[in-house]
Structure formats: structure tokens, C-alpha cells
Amino acid sequence: MGRAPARSILGQRALERPTVLVVNQHSLSDAEDFTEGYRTLKLGKVVGEPTAGWIIYTWNQSLIDGTGFRLPRVKITASDGTDMERHPRPVDVEITRPIGETLTGRDSQLDAAVRELLNQLGKSAQH
């Protein structure tokens, strides 16, 4: 097969409209990789809080007594070759949700993302 970027093979292709990605400390595993791909492809701003920095591929391993555990097997690196494990993906617009905000029905990270998207749409309309 021919060569292609991993993000494209996984179906994470660029859209033809402005986009914003919302992440926070609860974004882990493939969210780390997705955020890295989103930033590398320059698809838009990343809003919220840095990701958790937890990404390593593991496989199930069974012991003789039937106990199972996950064994790390693949190290994941960023597009520049640096290790992504324990290195959270940064954000462009940092917004920390206040404690208890979920009980109010508001989401300050989503509000900031919408503001950023509207700002992008305004700039594209001027061109």
C-alpha cells in the first residue's frame, strides 16, 4: 500500500469549514492522539484545558492463575518525535471550568469554543 498520514487513515480528515476542538484533563488515550493530529493538520484552535498526557498502547496479558493485566507495548510520539506519554497536549485558548459549573447547566469551555468559532467565521466572511 502507499504511504499516508495516520490521521487520514483513521478517518480524521480536514473539513472545509472552520473548526474548534474542545479538550480537557479528562481527554485521554486517543483524545491525546486526535488532539496532536488536529494541531499538526492546523484544523483550528484547541480550547479548554491541556489533556491528561496518558497515551500508551497496551494489550491484555493473562497469567497462569487466570489473572489478567494490561501490558504496555507501543510508545506513542508526537509529530516531532517527542514522547506523548506524560506530556499533555497543549491548548490555544485555556479555559478552566469553575468547580460546580456542571450543576449550573453552563459550560465555559464550550462557550469559549463557540466564541472562537464565531470569530473564525467572522474573519473568513471578511476575506
Image: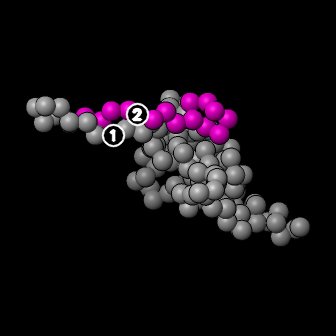
Dot 2, how many residues are within 10 Å of its Cα: few (below 14), some (14-19), or many (20+)? Answer: few
Secondary structure beneath dot 1 equals strand
Location of residue 78 in the rendering, given as x and y in whole percent from the top left corner = 61, 37
Q: Which numbered disc flags the more N-terminal residue, 2 or 1?
A: 1
Q: Residue at x 67, y 62 (%)?
A: 14
Mark yes or no: residue 33 visible. Answer: yes
Residue 16 lies, in percent from the top left, at 71, 68
Location of residue 18 in the rendering, given as x and y in whole percent from the top left corner: 71, 63
- In the displayed structure image, the side of residue 4 where residue 64 appears, left or right: left
Q: Which mark is residue 59?
A: 1
Q: Given the image, on which type of amino acid does mark 1 rest? A: Trp
Answer yes or no: is residue 118 visible: no
Question: Is residue 42 found left or right of 96 in the rendered image?
Answer: right
Badge 2 marks a residue whose secondary structure is strand
Residue that numbered label 2 is attached to: 73
Please identify the quadrant where the C terminus is shown. bottom right
- In this rendered view, identify the residue nearer to me: 65 or 53: 65
Marks 2 & 1, CB-CB < 8 Å contact = yes
Q: Is residue 102 above or below residue 25?
A: below
- Report the magenta residues as a range: 69-83
Residue extending furthest toward the front: 1
Residue sitting farthest toward the left? 65
Three-letter code, disc 2: Arg
Q: Which quadrant is home to the N terminus?
A: bottom right
Residue lying at the far right of the rendered structure:
127
